[in-house]
Image (cartoon, rainbow, N blue to C red):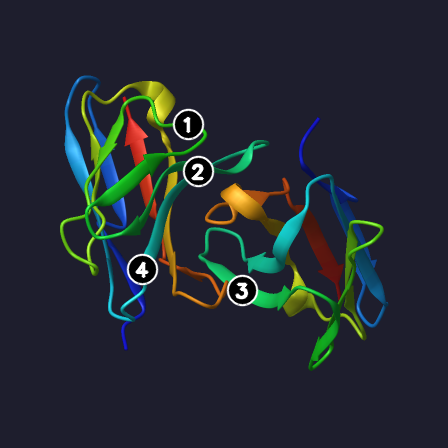
Amino acid sequence: KNEVEQSPQNLTAQEGEFITINCSYSVGISALHWLQQHPGGGIVSLFMLSSGKKKHGRLIATINIQEKHSSLHITASHPRDSAVYICAVFGSGGSNYKLTFGKGTLLTVNP
Amino acid sequence: NAGVTQTPKFQVLKTGQSMTLQCAQDMNHEYMSWYRQDPGMGLRLIHYSVGAGITDQGEVPNGYNVSRSTTEDFPLRLLSAAPSQTSVYFCASYGTGTYEQYFGPGTRLTVT
C-alpha cells in the first residue's frame, strides 16, 4: 500500500465548477505539499501545510492531522487549471529529509 | 536568484553509455534530492543529500551515483545507461528550518 494515496486519479470538470482533490497518508508527517505540474512542464509548489488551512487566490488547501487527510479545492475552475496535482509528504522523525509522493490527479477543465 | 537549474533539458543515450545530469541551486540550501518521474509511478527518490559531503540512497538508487562536493551542486551520474532509466529527472532543494521545496525544470532522458 502506498504511503500517500490521492483521489480521484482523473477528474474532468466544466469551467466554473468547484473542484476537490483528496490526499490520505499513513505515516506521521512534518509537512504536506500540494504541487502542480502542467503537461510536459516543471513542478511548482502550490502550498505547504503542517496544520489548518491556506488560501491563495482560487486555491484552498486544508489538512486534518488527526485524520491524516488533506484536500485541495479549486473554486471557479478555469481551463488553465488543467494540470496534474500531486500531494507529497515529509515524514517525521528519521525520514523527515525525504518527500513521499502520491501518484497525482490529472485535472482537465473544459471551457 | 536562478533557483534550481538543471542541464541538459533533453538527452538521448545509447545503452551502456554514461553521463552526468547537472543540478545547481543558488539559495544556499542544505538539502538536495534527485527524483525520477515515470508514468503511473509518480515521483520516486533516487538519492538525496543533507549537506556538502553527505549523501544517501533513496527508493531507487541502483544504476545511479551522486556526490556533493559543494553546497550549490548535486550531480547525478548514470554509470551504464539502460532503457529502464528512460524517465524525466527532477532535482529539488530546500533549506534548514523550512520544508519549502524548489524544483528544477527537469531533464528528459531517453535510453535506446
Write down the residue under mark 3: A45
Write down the residue under mark 4: B30
Q: CA distance from mark 1 to mark 2?
A: 6 Å
Mark 4 or mark 3, whichever is nearer to me: 4
Label 1 with label 2: CB-CB less than 8 Å: yes
Q: Nearer the viewer, residue B93 or A73?
A: B93
Write down the residue under mark 2: B45
Residue at 46% x, 68% y: name it: B97
Which of marks 1 and 4 precedes in the sequence? 4
Q: Which mark is residue A63?
A: none
Mark 2 or mark 4, whichever is nearer to me: 4
- What's the chain of the residue with tag 4? B
Residue at 27% x, 29% y: name it: B64
Q: Nearer the viewer, residue B53 or A107?
A: B53
Label 4 with label 3: CB-CB less than 8 Å: no
Label 2 with label 4: CB-CB less than 8 Å: no
Residue reaching furthest to the front: A93
Mark 1 or mark 3, whichever is nearer to me: 1
